[in-house]
Amino acid sequence: MLGRFILNYPDTARRLGGLVLFAITMVALYSIGISAHWLGTIVPPLADWVKENPVVARVLSAFSISLILFLNWKLLKRL
């Protein structure tokens, strides 16, 4: 079934693979305990929010770093 999907819809499978890698990177960053302190440093109004919501801040931090890595990979791949 997966083989048919990849053969019939290669562009969709490629995009889905990219999203899976994005999600795996985000989960890996969260699981190693990525710090969210830098969010409060870059955006000062978030400093109090980061202290009040450490778990959500870690998720946001992992998402932001994964997004930066993913976009850099996509943009540099074209060069």
Image (tube, grey):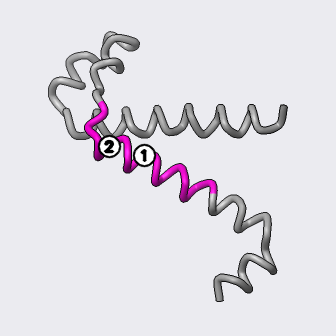
The quarter of the image holding the C terminus is top right
Disc 2 marks which residue?
A: 30
Determine which residue is flagged by label 1: 26
In depth, the one of 72 and 46 nearer the eye is 72
As helix, strand or loop, the secondary structure at mark 1 comes to: helix
Neighbor class of circle 2 (other Cα within 10 Å; few <14, some 14-19, many 20+) is some
Magenta region: 18-34
Closer to the camera in the image, 53 or 16: 16
Establish if 66 lies above or below 14.
above
* Apparent side of residue 79 relative to residue 59 in the rendered image (left or right): right
- Residue visible at 37% across and 41% down? 29
- Report which quarter residue 55 is drawn in: top left
Find residue 20 and report its horizontal and vertical position in percent: 54, 59
Residues at marks 2 and 1, CA–CA distance in whole angstroms: 6 Å
Q: Is residue 31 magenta?
A: yes
Amino acid type of disc 1?
Answer: Met
The residue positioned 72% from the left and 61% from the top of the image is: 14
